[in-house]
Amino acid sequence: MAPDLDAFDHVHVYVQDRAAAERWYAAVLGFERTKALEAWAVNGGPLTLQNAGGTIHIALFERPRQACRSTVALRVDAAGFHAWRRHLAEVPALAVTLEDHDLSLSLYLHDPDGNPYEITTYDAAAARAGLV
């Protein structure tokens, strides 16, 4: 049996222009630089960003656009789902799709480099009740 893991640490995200990506992640997802890891952001190393609570980290690597992508899913409760839906609707030119997966509801979007994100809730019944 495998030993237990403490937490999901971070995801590598490949972007063509790291400075532009950092601005997008701040404006759209509210992510900020992880100050303690800034020293890594040299010589091709990652620029690590995090949410306000420090519970979600992404490592931005400046690389050419890549075709194969994995979707990064971020979980929220029903109230958070609606707050994100309202927030994302205010982002100019951002395409967001809503999918009802029966057991969950998800919002799908892409960053400017084509990296896919999902904001999902398993509090589907409560979230569905507010989708008028």
Image (spheres, rainbow, N blue to C red):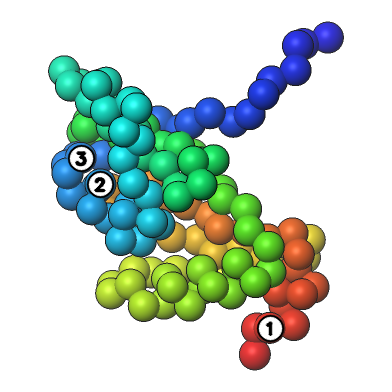
The C terminus - image quarter: bottom right
Q: Residue at x 36, y 78 (%)?
A: 90
Q: Residue furthest bottom?
A: 132
Name the residue nearer the viewer: 29 or 108. Answer: 29
Q: List the residue tagged with mark 3.
A: 18
**Residue 84 location (% of width, % of height):** 51, 68
- Gap in angstroms between the C-alphas marked 1 and 3: 37 Å
Name the residue nearer the viewer: 86 or 98. Answer: 86
Taking the image as drawn, is residue 71 in sight?
A: no
Classed neighbour count for the residue bearing mark 2: other residues with Cα under 10 Å, few (<14), some (14–19), many (≥20): some
Q: Residue at x 53, y 55 (%)?
A: 118
Which image quarter: residue 17? Answer: top left
**Mark 2 belongs to which amino acid?**
Glu
- Gap in angstroms between the C-alphas marked 2 and 3: 6 Å
CB within 8 Å, label 2 to label 1:
no
Dot 1 falls on a residue whose secondary structure is loop
Q: List the residue tagged with mark 2.
A: 22
**Residue 25 location (% of width, % of height):** 33, 52
The dot on residue 130 is 1
**Residue 19 location (% of width, % of height):** 17, 44
Disc on the earlier residue, 2 or 1: 2
Dot 2 falls on a residue whose secondary structure is helix
The N terminus - image quarter: top right
Q: Residue at x 76, y 64 (%)?
A: 123
Classed neighbour count for the residue bearing mark 1: other residues with Cα under 10 Å, few (<14), some (14–19), many (≥20): few
The dot on residue 89 is none
Which image quarter: residue 2? Answer: top right
**Residue 63 location (% of width, % of height):** 22, 30
CB within 8 Å, label 2 to label 3:
yes
